[in-house]
Image (cartoon, grey):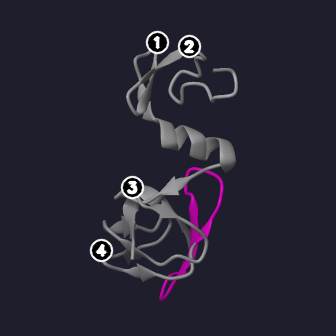
Amino acid sequence: MNDLPACPECSSVYFYESGSEYVCAECAHEWDKDIALEGENQDKVVRDANGNILSDGDSVTVIKDLKVKGSSLVVKVGTKVKNIRIVDGDHDIDCKIDGIGAMQLKSSFVKKL
């Protein structure tokens, strides 16, 4: 159990196996074994609103109207964004949108094409 990552919620090292999941003994958080192994192999796995894994160069579609901070512009639902780049931080997608320019998006507001 020492080579496995700690609980993603409370960072506890006390968890047990329940079928195809791990369950934290302290906070009762459940997570998939495959996701735990992905976390070991990569620094961060970024997923879209549907749970699909995103990577550099993917194309995505915006699923919600997004106001551009500091501007009166709005990124409309259905806007297609090509050639994204995954970055660290809260806004984990770096991209360039036609008519608006360079900006960062949260992966929870996009879906993979």
Q: Secondary structure at mark 1?
A: loop
In this view, the residue in front, 55 or 108, is 55
Q: Amino acid at mark 4?
A: Val
Q: Position of residue 12 (x, y in %)?
A: 58, 17
Q: Amino acid at mark 3?
A: Gly
**Circles 2 and 1: CB atoms closer than 8 Å:** yes
Name the residue beneath numbered marker 1.
25
In this view, the residue in front, 7 or 2, is 2
Disc on the earlier residue, 2 or 1: 2
Name the residue beneath numbered marker 4.
77
As measured in the structure, the alpha-carbon distance from the residue carrying label 2 to the one carrying label 1 is: 6 Å
Q: Secondary structure at mark 4?
A: loop
- Residue shown at 38% from the left, 28% from the top: 19
Q: Amino acid at mark 1?
A: Ala
**How crowded is the residue under tag 3: few (<14 C-alpha within 10 Å), some, or many (20+)?**
few
Disc on the earlier residue, 3 or 4: 3
As measured in the structure, the alpha-carbon distance from the residue carrying label 1 to the one carrying label 4 is: 41 Å
**How crowded is the residue under tag 2: few (<14 C-alpha within 10 Å), some, or many (20+)?**
some
Question: Is 76 above or below relative to 108?
Answer: below
As measured in the structure, the alpha-carbon distance from the residue carrying label 3 to the one carrying label 2 is: 27 Å
Q: Position of residue 84 (x, y in %)?
A: 56, 74
- Residue 51 shows which numbered tag? 3
Q: Secondary structure at mark 2?
A: loop
In this view, the residue in front, 3 or 102, is 3
**How crowded is the residue under tag 4: few (<14 C-alpha within 10 Å), some, or many (20+)?**
some
As measured in the structure, the alpha-carbon distance from the residue carrying label 2 to the one carrying label 4 is: 43 Å
Name the residue beneath numbered marker 2.
14
